[in-house]
Image (tube, rainbow, N blue to C red):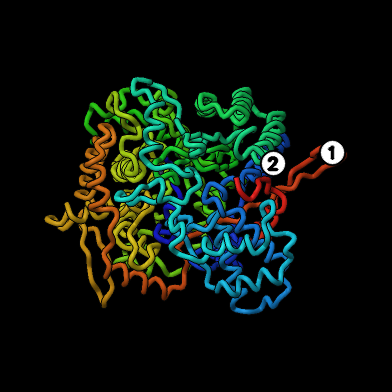
Amino acid sequence: MNNLKQILIYSMALTISCKEPIQKTGESADGFDYLAEQFADLRILRYQVPGFDSLNLNQKKLVYYLSQAALCGRDIVFDQNGKYNLAIRRTLENIYETYSGDRETEDFSNFMVYLKRIWFSNGIYHHYSADKFVPDFSEGYFNSLIENSDKSELPLKHGQSPEDLMHELIPVIFDPGVLPKKVCQDQNKDIVAGSAVNFYEGVSQPQVESFYNEMKNPQDPQPVSYGLNSKIMMKDGMIREVVWKMDGMYGEAIEQILFWLDKAQTVTETAGQAATIQKLIEYYKTGNLSAWDEYNILWVKDQKSLVDFINGFIETYDDPLGLKATWESVVNFRNNEATRRTEILSNHAQWFEDNSPVDDQFKKKEVKGVTAKVITVVQLGGECYPAAPLGINLPNADWIRKDYGSKSVTIENITYAYDQANLKTGFLEEFAADKEEIELARKYGFRAYNINIDLHECLGHGSGQMKPGVASDALKNYHAPVEETRADLFALYYIMDPIMEELGLLPTQDAAKAEYNRYIRNGLITQLVRILPGKDIEQAHMRNRQLIARWCLEKGRENNVIELISRAGKTFCRINDYDRLRLLFGELLREVQRIKSEGDYESAKKLVESYGVKVDKYLHEEVLSRYQKLNLSPYSGFINPELIPVEEEGEILDVEIRYPVDYAAQMMHYSRNYSFLPSYN
Ligand code: ZN
């Protein structure tokens, strides 16, 4: 649950105090072109991999093999995100490759935007809001595209004609009322039946709930993650669980992943890493969830290896019931220098736990193995591509976290790329309350923001404990926003603590002020740029950020802790009392930890629904109009570097890294070379 995805966009302070002059055309400090292109509400960025050349040959091979494995699961995510996604993607890619008509028209350009958006979202639902997006061209134009493309390459089912295919796909593509949401969160509806995500078929929410409730044993202190790697279907009047494994569903892609994991096995750095990969192979072969837990324990324990990776069905954000996991992969290696920073935090984890404002009964008596590191990403795959996480904290199973700890990472080459791409956008200048705020942000923003991520991932998620007997999924659909609220509050509470300077993590309390400014500004105002007019907030992280900011605005009103200012028709927010705000963060943290520890569903619901969901219509309109004038896109994703083995007589002598610039070319390269699943699974 802890995949800190896309926390920042422009809303982070976004500019490091750039001591070096800005050079060359890229408008970045190092001359690299971070921005590749921009369309719809998306920006495509590039990232560099500093330190790759200093890896030894074995490590480079390992990174290469794991990166291949990361690419082989791409189709799985498309299929999980909606059962028509692969057929739609292939139909559109076929047009892209073979259409013989005019490509210089507005219609064709709209077609390209639609295809690029599907690549970006791994399907037809917005990667962040989970709403279906529809094309800006007509059904008639779509038919003419098909007519003038090579029909022999269409993804037809046995006996299906191109007309049948169109008949099937057109409502899914064009009708906003058909399968409108990937994940339905409306509590007045059946959230299983109302979600288009391909985790369930022909079953209702009560059926699924009772299916898993029968499996669960509340007394089991080490429960497996029931339902994590399977689809639930109604077949012949019986509920059946179809497991994602080598000989099961998605087997064609999993076989390819296994091929590369086997190769990786031959070049591991440590015995711990070898055991980890071996266990992952066993899990993919059997689908056995105990093997998955054992793999996670081995993975947490492997601290020595420089190269690391995640690969599997991991995060459950896309399941309305929070059971089933979307496939993802990230390949990386440790940034030793920056890791010293997070080691300082994890070495003091017990101090942070003991001194937090949380009720003593909900504190961990002994914080185990919170390990944190800063990593350099080499490859993003599955749900982590192209929209990348900025930090990761795994594994998700509460009992493993309690008994074995967790690994927490901050992905600095990705955050750095965001930061560089955001220089000179004018966003900060538009939304910051005054010059002082801008200066603080420029001076300390990047550094303080990174510390906030470290605190959130390394300490926040790992803190606290459950009351005995409370199930970890007791908060149901409110689990994710509450969990993120908890981790954010832990970070916010401590970033202003004098210990930050004592430990040498921040140079002055002004840095924490810069982060408070950014956080509140984002939660109250700037994150609204991502919400379409008339919509509520649905995404867990966004709910949690507004929840915190609005709650503090309200509770601090009497003392004018946070002030909303109106100037020339524009709204700004200013923090008048940083110390009081910190106390409010502490107060809310205490309550949110109680809610989680006791599994208090009603309080979770009330808190999230009261502060995190509804938006102020007038403020929203104003913010969107100010944002529009900046001509920016609120979401970003990344083009992966390309790893090229240098071979002689079948032996890899070196692995070279290149940085492609063409987004569509990379997507087509992946679709041609790493697409292993049938169109319907
Ligand atoms: Zn998180």
Q: From the viewer's perspective, is 533 left or right of 126?
A: left
Residue 160 visible in the snapshot: yes
Q: Nearer the viewer, residue 611 or 323?
A: 323
Residue drawn at x 34%, y 28% is: 350
Residue at the outermost front position: 236
Q: From the viewer's perspective, is 192 left or right of 383?
A: left
Dot 1, how many residues are within 10 Å of its Cα: few (below 14), some (14-19), or many (20+)? few
Q: From the viewer's perspective, is 182 left or right of 619?
A: right
Which label sits on residue 455? none
Q: Nearer the viewer, residue 95 or 515?
A: 95
Q: Indicate whether 4 appears above or below 106.
A: above
Q: CA distance from mark 1 to mark 2?
A: 15 Å
Residue at the outermost right position: 649
Mark 1 belongs to which amino acid?
Gly
Check disc 1 and report its element: helix, strand or loop: loop
Residue drawn at x 55%, y 43% is: 328
Dividing the image into 4 quarters, which one contains the C terminus?
A: top right
Q: Nearer the viewer, residue 177 or 164?
A: 164
Q: Position of residue 57 (x, y in %)?
A: 73, 37
Dot 2, how many residues are within 10 Å of its Cα: few (below 14), some (14-19), or many (20+)? many
Q: Which residue is mark 1?
A: 650
Which circle's residue, 1 or 2, is located before the other in the chain?
A: 2
Dividing the image into 4 quarters, which one contains the N terminus?
A: top left
Check disc 2 and report its element: helix, strand or loop: helix
Q: Nearer the viewer, residue 178 or 662?
A: 178
Residue 55 visible in the snapshot: no
Q: Which residue is mark 2?
A: 64
Quarter-wise, where is residue 553 in the image? bottom left
Quarter-wise, where is residue 441 in the image? bottom left
